[in-house]
Amino acid sequence: MTKPKIEFNKIPITVLQGFLGSGKTTMLNYILTHNEGMNIGVVVNDFGDINIDSKLIKSQSDKQLELTSGCICCSLKTLDLQEAIDQFVFKGSNIDYIIIEASGLAEPRDLALTLRTTLGQKVRLDGIVTVIDAENIEKNASEHDIARDQILFCDFVVINKVDLVKPDKIQDIRQMITSFNPRVRVLESTKGRIDIRLLLDQDLYKSRALPSNDASIDDHDNHPIDHSDHLHEKYTSYSWTSPEPLHPMKFQDFVNRKLPTNVYRAKGIIDFGLKGHSRKYIFQLVGVRPEIVWENWDQKPLTEIVFIGQDIDKGLIKKELEACIDDTPDKQLEGNIELKLPKKADL
């Protein structure tokens, strides 16, 4: 199957947040040393508050750290957020991605609202990732509203330091997380090591190809095997194609209620036929947050969707998607209702 490509003009931003001591900086260092060939712009509150691995630092100024990996780190001590982002999005910039490392005491509700509404024309919010300390999250969540809100206002929760607690405690933590945010996607890590292809959306920027059909994703694919840097989890992708249009309401119900929480990301092109006013719809799911925009077809209508996750039940997803196929494709929505979705033009 030909891999669909989806081109966005905006640079994606991921927010890395977590309560004090959760391991955000350790995870950030891991991302910067396993950046999959991307040049990453990093925004932090203050260079003095973050311990970037000294081996990564190439040069330093009042406003920026230049990193040997091709990444740049920018401090909010001397710049406001928009100015810091502008350091990366000027004409001719080679930055592929931006990570904002939020203060451990940043208000998650305000941060999420700001990023989702005021980022501007050159960048877009991809995901908000909350890192939690497996040893102390229950205490932190019981004593601090911010620790609970960081779980509530995010797309992914990474339970860090899982090697320091017993498996039954991990299950208790998962139950606590889902009591706050039932549909959030939960991952586990040791020393901040995580497959960054789940946290950073590399495929939707600069026409990066979607993963191949049934491809396995493992950290060893692109890095020499090193047992000190071993990721035990393995992630897979599942691709589904249909030449028949889908019913938009059935698809919405599938995304909102039937998509398993072990699907961390989904992306693709959808044909809703006449019910979609014969437009092409571009779909992406980041954690619990789905987005759909439209543009005009430049090829024969075809639905192609890729799902990325862990232990994906491909048969179940296939069954649910087949149930979304429109059994009355020659009819428009009742009352000729128009789908109120944004156009892709500025994305």
Image (tube, rainbow, N blue to C red):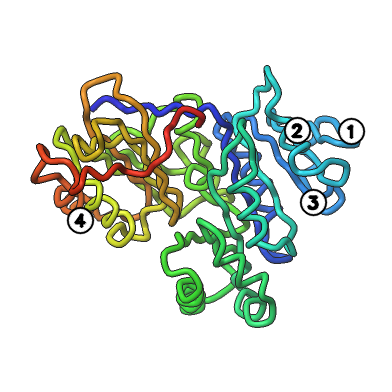
**Residue carrying label 2:** 67
The residue at the point 60 percent across, 35 percent down is 123
Q: Residues within 10 Å of mark 1 (few under 14, many from 20)?
A: few
Q: Amino acid at mark 2?
A: Leu
On the picture, is 321 further left or further right than 212? left
Spatial separation of the CA atoms under disc 4 and disc 2? 44 Å
Whole-Å distance between the Cαs marked 4 and 1?
53 Å
The kind of secondary structure element at disc 3 is loop
Left or right: 237 in relation to 35: left
Q: Quadrant of the N terminus?
A: top left
Q: Position of residue 168 (x, y in %)?
A: 46, 79
Q: What is the x, y in percent for residue 172?
A: 48, 79
What's under tag 1, amino acid-wise?
Answer: Ser
- Please say if the residues under marks 1 and 3 sit with CB atoms less than 8 Å apart: no
Residue plotted at (58% across, 48% down)? 116
Q: Residue at x 60, y 79 (%)?
A: 138
Decide: is 325 above or below 191: above
Q: Helix or strand or loop: what does disc 1 sit on?
A: loop
Residue where numbered disc 4 is placed: 316
Estimate the x, y position of residue 267 in percent, counting from the top left: 37, 40
In the rendered structure, find residue 61 and report the number of the disc placed on it.
Answer: 1
Cα separation, mark 3 vs mark 4, equals 43 Å
Q: Nearer the viewer, residue 147 or 137?
A: 147
Tell me which numbered mark, 4 or 2, is placed earlier along the sequence: 2
Label 1 and label 3: CA atoms lie apart by 15 Å
> Which residue position is annotated with label 3?
50
